[in-house]
Amino acid sequence: MKIPALHYGSITPRCFRIPLWVHCFAWNIFILVTLALVGVSRGGQGRNVWEGWRESSELRHPAYAERVYVNAVFRTRANTWSNLAYILVGLYGLAIGWHDLRRPCPRGAAYLAQTPALSLAFGLACCYLGAGSGLFHASLTRFGQQLDVAAMYAPLLVLIALNIGRWIPRLRLGRRHWSFPTWPILVALVGVAGWLLFLYKWAMSSMIVLCTLIVTVGLFTVLDRFRTSRKTDVRWLAWSFLSLITAVICRQMDVAGRFSGPDAWLQGHTLWHIFTSLSLACMYFYYRSEVTVWPDHVLSEKQPSSFD
């Protein structure tokens, strides 16, 4: 690997090259899930499969512009199908985490590459988000809404846990300086927090919780700028921010009824799903781009290693 000509040297690659099998796994499972949903949609035609479920307020008073088909399996079509974007991001997270688990971690690799459990947790969180949001937009039920809102928090909780782990990778206790990794505790806390946020969804403002989590992740990225021993590629961060801003604009235009007609496949909230999934993917690769930075005299004593 060619070492970049920097004032400080890096002993790891500036980006992660994804193996071909990861792409094959993610896209093959994605296609299978899509075909399964097509089968569910066709199999439920002519029947109200959501009968008996408690309705959400959005069934009779939609918050978004897309037309509601009360007796369909997917009561809002574009807003349901677009949640597959989260599933795709989640499948990549799962595959990359499995890839990390099966290979020795190179010296100086990103913390995310060193802890496959966090990639797996991120992948599961994104799949959870796609399933929860998809269920809500398909059913417009109260349970679906509860699951949708709680699932929105999950990937952000994992990113916060990831950042804490990057700053505090190990805990040292006792006079004998016993040391153990923090990631098992962080993953467990993400699970507990996710369950509590689901359980008490109706007792709190989802907008306040969501904004708080986003701001917390943002503050960690600001702290990264003051970190001299580890560097990240800010281009991924910029793309994530632009994607999020685009998603918010599309969503707000949709709520205001100024994006498209009710029967259009391209809905503002559909783009909210696509661009927020893109934002999450960019954040994942932002942390994946992390490299160890050494002064030149230290770098000269080290040999670079590769992710491949």
Image (cartoon, rainbow, N blue to C red):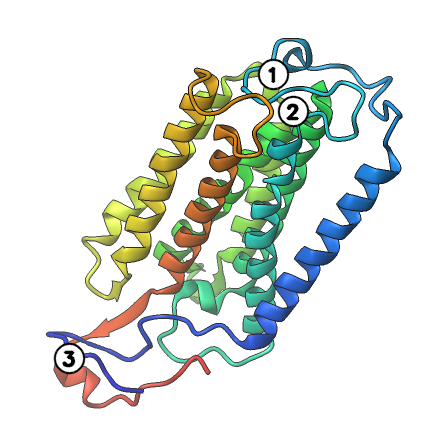
The local crowd at label 1, few if under 14, some if 14 to 19, many if 20 or more residues have their Cα within 10 Å, is few
Amino acid residing under circle 3? Ala
The local crowd at label 3, few if under 14, some if 14 to 19, many if 20 or more residues have their Cα within 10 Å, is few
> In which image quadrant can residue 287 be found?
bottom left
Q: Position of residue 147 (x, y in %)?
A: 66, 30
Q: Is residue 285 above or below residue 104?
A: above
Q: Nearer the viewer, mark 3 or mark 1?
A: 3
Q: Is residue 277 above or below residue 234?
A: above
Residue for badge 3: 5
Residue 193 horizontal side relative to residue 4, left or right: right
Residue 295 horizontal side relative to residue 106, left or right: left
First in residue order: circle 3 vs circle 1: 3
Q: Is residue 196 visible?
A: no
Q: Position of residue 80 (x, y in %)?
A: 65, 34
Which residue lies at the image location 20% right of the left edge and 84% below the top edge? 299
Name the element at disc 1: helix
Nearest the viewer among 102 and 29 is 29
Amino acid residing under circle 1? Trp
Q: Are marks 1 and 2 in contact (CB under 8 Å)?
A: yes
Residue for badge 1: 202
Report, in whole angstroms, how far the alpha carbon at label 3 lies from the one at label 1. Answer: 53 Å
Q: Which mark is residue 146?
A: 2
Nearest the viewer among 249 and 17 is 249
